[in-house]
Image: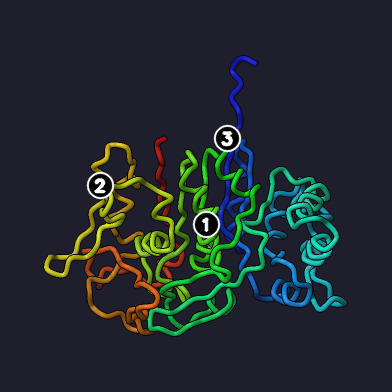
Amino acid sequence: MAGHFPRKRYVSLGGGTGQSQVIRALRMLDCEISAVVAMADDGGSTGVIRREMGVVPPGDVRNCLVALAADPMGPVARAFQRRLPVASDHALGNLILATLDEECDSFVDAIEMCERMLGCVGSVLPSTQEFVALRGITCDGRPISGEELIGTSPCTIGRVCLEPERPEACPEAVAAILSADVIVMGPGSLFTSIIPNVLVPGIARALHDTSATRIFVCPKADTQYETWGLTADEYVRALYDHGAARCTTRRPPGSSSVPRRTPSTRPGVSPPTSTSGRSTTMAPRAAWTPSSSIAPGRTGAPRPGPSRRSPPSRLPPTRHVARSTPRDARPSPRTSCRTSTMFAWTMPS
């Protein structure tokens, strides 16, 4: 038909409550939506069902299904979210997903049946169908096991990993990423909702190979618990350190993907550069320059609060981008927590 343009394909990559909010925003666009959900959740009703029934966590999948429902406020969607006192306060949707997982050939098949029940306008896909656990270590060297405990860590998290280390990616999720036009990572908890997806090798490989524009929405800076004290550029640094560096731009061997602080010079920020002629860096320079609107970082002075010592050698330390904004100019944590910063980059073929 003349003048007809195909609908763009958007993929939301993440988990937690932030992902369902992104889905609701994307529904205002005329686009095809797929949600790729992290499978490391082990808290609340989801954690109990996961341990007692031996299924992958259904909670975040349930929230995405309701967000994609034909009528998110209709009786079926409300029933999915309803918690039943007669069933230990489990959400009905969690119980349906877990039971269908046992009756169907795979968790993906169970999700598809729920999509038909809700009349979903998009698809929901797990990043992996394997039973995985999240392990982490704080910046002062304390090991933490479990997504729920990592999410309420008493100190900033330095590194996380999955167990098993290399789970197989869901083929449908890989296909959705490869065929996408735009991929939105976040908003959501950095170490417990976003990074667990990147830690699945097949998902990271698909993020590298896709021709889609990749967008990272940094939901907050300088907040409590797992990302205490981290600024927007440190969020990106953590993504790079956990494998997302190979998902962004091609760089000459030996070049740094993010500028590092040089002790002998005054700290400052400069955007990454490329000499290959094929790369497109995280383009707007403003995205790399701290300002009062995006939680400027410290200038080398120690920050009060939980210890920020480098983690032990068994887990490489997270490197930080140098910044030149005076520490006194930083906004209050309350202001920072309400701030969102977005980075976008493309990978030319």
Q: How is the image coloured?
A: rainbow
Relative horizontal placement of residue 296, taking residue 93 as reference (left or right): left
Helix, strand or loop at label 1? It is helix
Q: Residue 201 shows which numbered tag? A: 1
Location of residue 47 by image quarter: bottom right
Which residue position is annotated with label 3?
Answer: 8
Q: Residues within 10 Å of mark 2 (few under 14, many from 20)?
A: some
Work out whether 260 lies above or below 175.
Answer: below
Helix, strand or loop at label 3? It is strand
Q: Residue 273 shows which numbered tag? A: 2
Q: Residue 161 shows which numbered tag? A: none
Spot occupied by residue 268 in the image (x, y as percentages of width and height): 20, 61
Spot occupied by residue 67 in the image (x, y as percentages of width and height): 69, 53
Location of residue 28 by image quarter: top right
Relative horizontal placement of residue 129, taking residue 288 as reference (left or right): right
Residue placed most toward the observer, 88 or 27:
88
> Count of labels shown?
3
The answer to whether any part of residue 201 appears in the image is yes
> Are circles 2 and 3 on residues that touch, CB within 8 Å?
no
Q: CA distance from mark 1 to mark 2?
A: 27 Å
Helix, strand or loop at label 2? It is loop
Q: Nearer the viewer, mark 1 or mark 2?
A: 1
Q: CA distance from mark 2 to mark 3?
A: 30 Å
Q: Amino acid at mark 3?
A: Lys
Location of residue 79 by image quarter: bottom right
**Which image quarter is the N terminus in?**
top right
